Image (cartoon, grey):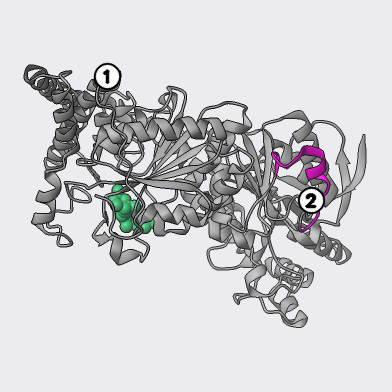
């Protein structure tokens, strides 16, 4: 799945077996859970239970999972609006995420942010953001702050292929490189290249379709990775995270991935791509790829797979029930949280 | 005790003291370090505090304002210098969509203790792109505090409050005031936001203003006094929050109000202030609220035209006379 242009190698760092595989079972479980979560969220959207926009991560799970598996509990991360899986991978209870989507008081942001703005600061999630690219500067400054405070914590910044065409991308990335010279910017930019920004494909929006190489213009080391293969992403992530933590210099990775669903729940017809392409990518479903690997290594059998799917169904059903039964935010909530003082 | 300082030195000394006191304060901006600051507010800061705290940025307003927001979210206390507020428009999305709203849409999970400061306004022949007054734009948005000091004492007291709060502050200075002198109280005396100052007492009319226009209002009031008209002059100090109480109380006493702003008239700060007065003192008004504002044109370069485009003391005097039906 390497891009046609640019020709940098897509790294394959596979360990044959071992603790690496056993410790990936919980991530398999989380990927199954989030897929189910997204499916049910979409159904709830169709039932009119969820308003606004709803952007699903189905098909891209291995990217966030691989990186979130590689960071420490005290590390932090920022992402865009396609953020449900990121939160759940990090341990935010699915029912609190679902309640947020339902606009309920029990949601992660008390129903004030919705699907696009998930926050779980105690777990290091500094937000979901709705203006494409606009979180990239925040993450960059946050990384600086972590070093300024004398810690060895790092920051991950997930972004889309489309976001790379914005000024919000180039300005902070250039600054990160400058700050990195003094070891003051421990950040990993993770491009989730799912080939499209809404309906605009990468090759219709930039001539340099080897997106990782764009970081090179700013002097940031970079590489591509097969974003459908959890084990590969995770291995790369562990190496990169260790290095960024040690050096305080930014690093960038372009994960080649694909969203198997529409841009948002309202994107029903998808005139920008053909069914054949989607079908082709379904053959590379990250959950199935990981399942096969774990199966082959003997750390997961059919009964366990079935149990994991059943458990996911139950958890998501419970999350829907919880969200449905939770109270709406009371009117007193309206003016709260605008400002810390006054 | 008090000492006489320029507006610039009041800002400079306050920033420096706070940086000495609080290691979480960092400065970001273009040419604030090696170059010493376009208006020399940060002269010598780099030597004193080092490059980790005094960060010379590339010309990337969006980038460094956004980065400062991220720093603030993590508990630093960044102070961004925009070379002038005109350039803040490149960072408008970061200020308006991130800094102002993050706290709300995160359900109160993060604070953004950020100060963005720099010169705002016109008056030194910088023409259309470099002479704007953007207070109404920023004051429109919930989640921001908008501060517009008129005196060195304001500059110090309001900056202290800005630097110790938990919210993003738009701190609007005025380049024409940097050299202005005034008494500045010693010691640690923050001026709370939302407390206007009555700079001159009077019973015939209330002139309301902020930033540089306060000085025009005071001059106009002196001239009016010679014709037997005693104007009260209010320096708002902050536009958001707006000290409605002081305004309304004064106008209920004087029955007449003139609002002075440098920016364009349509949808400007004066319109909001006039509305507040109508809401709170309608029954006691003896004349419509007058607005003295800049001309509704992009700022011209030629000195004579620029002067025509800016409010002048005589415009304030005329407006006051209209409220008294003296024309
Ligand atoms: C500045 C801005 N412009 C346009 C939009 C509308 N919009 C929302 S998502 C999107 C596509 C972004 O694509 P990409 O960065 O590749 O992320 P993906 O949706 O593929 O995850 C667009 C154009 C927006 N939210 N913000
Ligand atoms: Mg995309």
Quick check: do tags 1 and 2 share a chain? no
Quadrant of the rendered image holding ligand 1:
bottom left
Measured as percent of width and height from the top left, residue A23 is found at 28, 19
Q: What residue would you read off at disc 1?
A: A18
Q: Quadrant of the N terminus of chain B?
A: top right
Q: What residue would you read off at disc 2?
A: B41
Near-viewer residue (B323 or A183): A183
Give the foreground label among 1 and 2: 1
A107 over B254 or under it: above or below: above
Name the chief secondary structure element in magenta.
loop
Measured as percent of width and height from the top left, residue B209 is found at 70, 56
Structural distance between the alpha carbons of marks 1 and 2 = 60 Å
Which chain's residue wears label 2? B
Q: Where are the magenta residues, as a range?
A: B38-54
Asked if residue B321 lies left or right of residue A187, the reply is: right
Q: Does dot 1 land on a helix, a strand or a loop? A: loop
Which chain's residue wears label 1? A
Residue under the image location 46 percent in, 33 percent down: A337
* Residue B226 can be seen, yes or no: yes
Q: Quadrant of the C terminus of chain B?
A: bottom right
A163 over A208 or under it: above or below: above
Q: Does dot 2 land on a helix, a strand or a loop? A: loop
Measured as percent of width and height from the top left, residue B152 is found at 82, 48
Residue under the image location 32 percent in, 60 percent down: A5
């Amino acid at each position: 799945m390497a891009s046609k242009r640019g020709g940098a190698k897509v790294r394959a760092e596979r360990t044959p077996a071992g603790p690496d595989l056993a410790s990936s079972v919980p991530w398999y479980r989380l990927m199954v859970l989030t897929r189910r979560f997204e499916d049910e969220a979409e159904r709830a959207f169709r039932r009119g239970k969820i308003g606004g926009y709803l952007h699903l991560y189905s098909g891209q799970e291995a990217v966030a999972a691989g990186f979130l598996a590689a960071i420490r509990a005290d590390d932090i991360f920022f992402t865009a609006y396609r953020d449900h899986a990121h939160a759940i991978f990090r341990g935010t209870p699915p029912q609190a995420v679902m309640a947020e989507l339902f606009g309920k008081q029990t949601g992660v942001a008390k129903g004030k942010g919705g699907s696009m703005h998930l926050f779980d600061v105690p777990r290091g999630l500094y937000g979901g953001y709705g203006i494409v690219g606009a979180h990239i500067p925040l993450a960059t400054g946050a990384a600086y702050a972590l070093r300024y405070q004398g810690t060895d914590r790092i920051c991950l910044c997930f972004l889309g292929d489309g976001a790379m065409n914005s000024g919000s991308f180039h300005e902070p990335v250039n600054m990160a490189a400058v700050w990195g010279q003094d070891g003051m910017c421990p950040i990993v930019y993770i491009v989730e290249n799912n080939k499209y920004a809404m309906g605009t494909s990468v090759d219709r929006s930039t001539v340099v379709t080897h997106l990782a190489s764009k970081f090179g213009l700013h002097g940031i080391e970079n590489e591509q990775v097969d974003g459908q293969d959890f084990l590969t992403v995770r291995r790369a992530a562990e190496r990169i995270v260790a290095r960024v933590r040690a050096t305080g210099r930014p690093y960038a990775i372009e994960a080649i991935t694909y969203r198997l669903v529409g841009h948002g729940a309202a994107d029903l017809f998808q005139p920008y791509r053909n069914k054949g392409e989607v079908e082709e990518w379904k053959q590379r479903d990250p959950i199935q790829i990981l399942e096969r690997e774990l199966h082959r290594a003997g750390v997961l059998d059919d009964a366990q797979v079935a149990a994991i799917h059943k458990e996911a169904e139950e958890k998501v059903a419970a999350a829907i029930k919880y969200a449905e039964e939770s109270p709406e935010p009371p009117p007193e909530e309206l003016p709260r949280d605008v400002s810390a003082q006054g | 005790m008090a000492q006489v300082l320029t507006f610039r030195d009041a800002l400079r000394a306050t920033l420096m003291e706070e940086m000495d006191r609080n290691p979480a304060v960092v400065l970001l901006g273009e040419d604030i370090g090696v170059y010493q600051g376009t208006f020399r507010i940060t002269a010598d800061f780099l030597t004193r505090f080092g490059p980790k705290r005094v960060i010379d940025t590339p010309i990337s307003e969006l980038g460094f304002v956004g980065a400062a927001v991220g720093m603030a979210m993590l508990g630093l206390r960044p102070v961004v210098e925009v070379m002038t507020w005109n350039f803040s428009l490149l960072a408008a999305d970061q200020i308006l969509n991130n800094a102002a709203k993050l706290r709300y849409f995160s359900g109160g999970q993060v604070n953004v203790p950020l100060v963005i400061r720099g010169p705002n306004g016109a008056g030194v022949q910088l023409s259309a792109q470099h002479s704007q007054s953007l207070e109404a734009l920023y004051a429109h948005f919930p989640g921001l505090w908008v501060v517009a000091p008129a005196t060195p004492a304001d500059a110090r007291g309001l900056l202290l409050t800005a630097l110790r709060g938990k919210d993003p502050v738009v701190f609007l200075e005025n380049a024409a005031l940097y050299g202005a002198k005034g008494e500045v109280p010693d010691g640690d005396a923050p001026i709370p936001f939302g407390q206007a100052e009555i700079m001159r007492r009077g019973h015939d009319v209330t002139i309301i203003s902020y930033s540089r226009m306060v000085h025009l209002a005071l001059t106009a009031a002196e001239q009016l006094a010679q014709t037997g008209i005693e104007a009260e002059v209010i320096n708002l100090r902050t536009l958001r929050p707006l000290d409605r109480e002081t305004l309304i109380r004064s106008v209920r006493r004087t029955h007449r109000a003139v609002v002075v702003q440098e920016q364009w008239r349509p949808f400007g700060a004066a319109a909001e202030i006039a509305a507040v007065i109508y809401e709170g003192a309608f029954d006691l008004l003896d004349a419509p609220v007058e607005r003295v504002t800049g001309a509704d044109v992009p700022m011209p370069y030629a000195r004579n035209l620029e002067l025509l485009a800016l409010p002048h003391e005589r415009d304030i005097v005329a407006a006051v006379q209209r409220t008294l039906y003296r024309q």
